[in-house]
Amino acid sequence: MTLEAATSPAEPTGEIVSQPGKLMRLAAVARAMLDEARATPCDTEGCERFRRIYERTLHELSGLLSNDLKVELAYLSVTFDEPSPSPSEIRAAQAELVGWLEGLINGIAAAAMTQQAQAEEQAAEIAAAADAADRPGLYL
């Protein structure tokens, strides 16, 4: 599935996400990891595991996104200096990623709704033009 940016000519056009299903699965993983990081205390090994999953999620996401979105994702991505980040660092990084993913998904949904509305408007215009062509004119 390809979604085209449809809101204004100033926005980039083209493929936004190459595999929307995979994006949704990765977003679900990120949300679950954030919930898990909030719910349980994190020891050193657990924090290291969270870091690896976070980094792997970022890597997988970058393979799905347009160049504009890759740049945006790289800008917000956290690079952990320590091999084992603190629980608060993990939670903050996960929360930022989840928020960005939710914004991305909402933006894609809004673009799809805009496209649908435009298509419906065009169909209505075509139907109105066809009705006008079928009506008899003023001349006999």
Image (cartoon, rainbow, N blue to C red):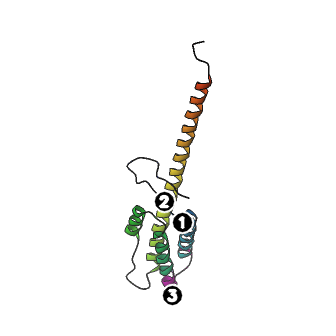
Judged by depth in the image, the label closer to the viewer, 2 or 1, is 1
Residue 104 image point, x, y percent: 48, 59
Label at residue 45: 3
Which region of the structure is painted magenta?
Answer: 38-49
Residue kind at label 1, given as amino acid type: Leu
Label at residue 104: 2
Please check the rendered image and state whether residue 40 is part of the magenta-colored stretch, yes or no. Answer: yes
Q: Are marks 1 and 3 in contact (CB under 8 Å)?
A: no
Helix, strand or loop for disc 3: helix
Q: Are marks 2 and 3 in contact (CB under 8 Å)?
A: no
Question: Residue visible at 44% across and 63% down?
Answer: 66
Question: Residue visible at 52% across and 59% down?
Answer: 105
Q: Are marks 2 and 1 in contact (CB under 8 Å)?
A: yes
Label at residue 131: none
Residue kind at label 2, given as amino acid type: Leu
Residue 107 image point, x, y percent: 49, 55
Alpha carbons under labels 2 and 3: distance apart: 31 Å
Residue 62 image point, x, y percent: 45, 70
Q: Earlier in the sequence, mark 2 or mark 3?
A: 3
Question: Residue visible at 56% across and 78% down?
Answer: 40
Residue 32 image point, x, y percent: 57, 71
Alpha carbons under labels 2 and 1: distance apart: 10 Å
Residue 17, visible in the rendered structure? yes
Helix, strand or loop for disc 1: helix
Residue kind at label 3, given as amino acid type: Glu
Q: Which residue is mark 1?
A: 23
**Main SS type for the magenta part?**
helix
Is the residue marked by circle 1 packed among few (<14), some (14-19), or many (20+) residues within 10 Å? many
Q: Is residue 63 above or below residue 109?
A: below
Name the quarter where the N terminus is drawn.
bottom right
